[in-house]
Image (cartoon, rainbow, N blue to C red):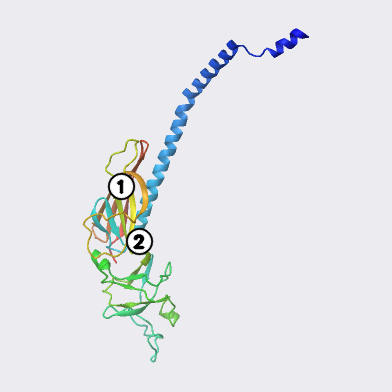
Amino acid sequence: MTSLRTARQRGFTIVELVIVIVITGIIAASLTVFFRPAVDSYLSSRSRADLTDQADTALRRMVRDVRVAVPNSIRTPGDQCFELIPTSTGGRYRRGPDTVNDAATCTSTTCSAPLDTTQATTVFDVLSPLSSTPAVGDWVVVGNQNPGDVYAGTNRGAITAAVSAPANAAFGRHRITVASTQFPIGYDGGRFSIVPNAQRAVFYVCSGADGTLDATGNGKGTLYRLMRDFNPVYPTACPSTAAADVLATRVRSCSFVYDPNQGATQQNGFVWMQLEVARNGEAAHMAIGAHVSNAP
């Protein structure tokens, strides 16, 4: 009984512990050799997916603004930035009085309200539905034939009252009141756009992206979205980004090219956007093009 109890209490010898440590090390090294590449590949794939998602999100945001921009409002001082005026909605305005439903004794509030381009307009009826209701302070834009017109204000008027319904449903779907403005002759069909006052003009600026990487393999640049007031002066350089929102970081390179006369009919412009982001030596490069209507 004594010898049996002594054997049970003896435990492991140093030699046995060394053998266990050696075997464990061999197994761990083997696992590292086989599984480390798979883990590294997974981490690299996830990093590239994150970079691709960041670049894709930034480009989609820019494309959305380009496609809803006021026609002919894109201005490009260089290939590292461009400016535009985004819209929130738009429709068709009444171009002439309703000779059928206007009564002989109707007043300015009970008659139909056309937008007359031969004189100043303060109220007009909208014939088409609006995807969103404009707010007081938003801007009505008609017939932007040249980039400078909408920035200078020669073809836009501020909404001064809440959008209402016409006195007669036959007159249209909505009635918009604006500050006294003589709008230019618009495009066929009587189209107008609404520019939200909260973001009158938008500048996309790629700053610090020189095509190189820092010591840790990251891009040095940042892509900004800057909202600012209407500026009648055509920009000659990218503006300061002190008050801008960050759209993408670790930008290695970017390029924006605008062709205002894409195609034989010259009815559409074309914006080509390229963006490359890099992090820890991994990079994602994406490019996309967007058409913009030049027919206001």
Q: Which residue is at the far left? A: 236
Res. 221 mark: none
**37 left or right of 99 in image:** right
Q: Is residue 262 in sight in this rendering?
A: no
Secondary element at image label 1: strand
Image quarter of the N terminus: top right
- Quadrant containing the C terminus is bottom left
Q: Is residue 235 above or below residue 9?
A: below
* Identity of the residue furthest to the top in this view: 3
Q: In the current view of this chain or complex, which residue is farthest to the right? A: 1
Instruction: Write the residue at 56% across / 13% down.
Output: 18
Q: Identify which residue is drawn at 42% across, 42% down.
A: 50
Residue 47 pos. (x, y %): 42, 39
Question: Taking 221 as reference, is 164 left or right?
Answer: right
Tell me which corner region of the image, top left, top right, bottom left or bottom right, holds residue 166: bottom left
Image disc number at residue 274 = 1
Task: Judge left or right: residue 204 versus residue 235.
Answer: right
Amino acid marked by disc 2: Val
Count of marks, rendered view: 2
Seen in the picture, residue 15 relative to 89 is either above or below; the reply is: above
Determine the residue positioned at 40% across, 39% down: 48
Q: Residues within 10 Å of mark 1 (few under 14, many from 20)?
A: some
Q: Eyeballing the image, is 174 above or below 201?
A: below
Residue labelled with disc 2: 68
Residue 236 visible: yes
> Residue placed at 49% from the left, 26% from the top?
35
Proximity of marks 1 and 2: CB atoms separated by less than 8 Å: no
In this view, the residue in front, 25 or 50, is 25
Give the residue type at disc 1: Gln
Q: Considering depth in this image, is 13 or 146 the residue closer to the camera?
A: 13
Circle nearer the N terminus (1, 2): 2
Per the model, the C-alpha gap separating discs 1 and 2 is 20 Å
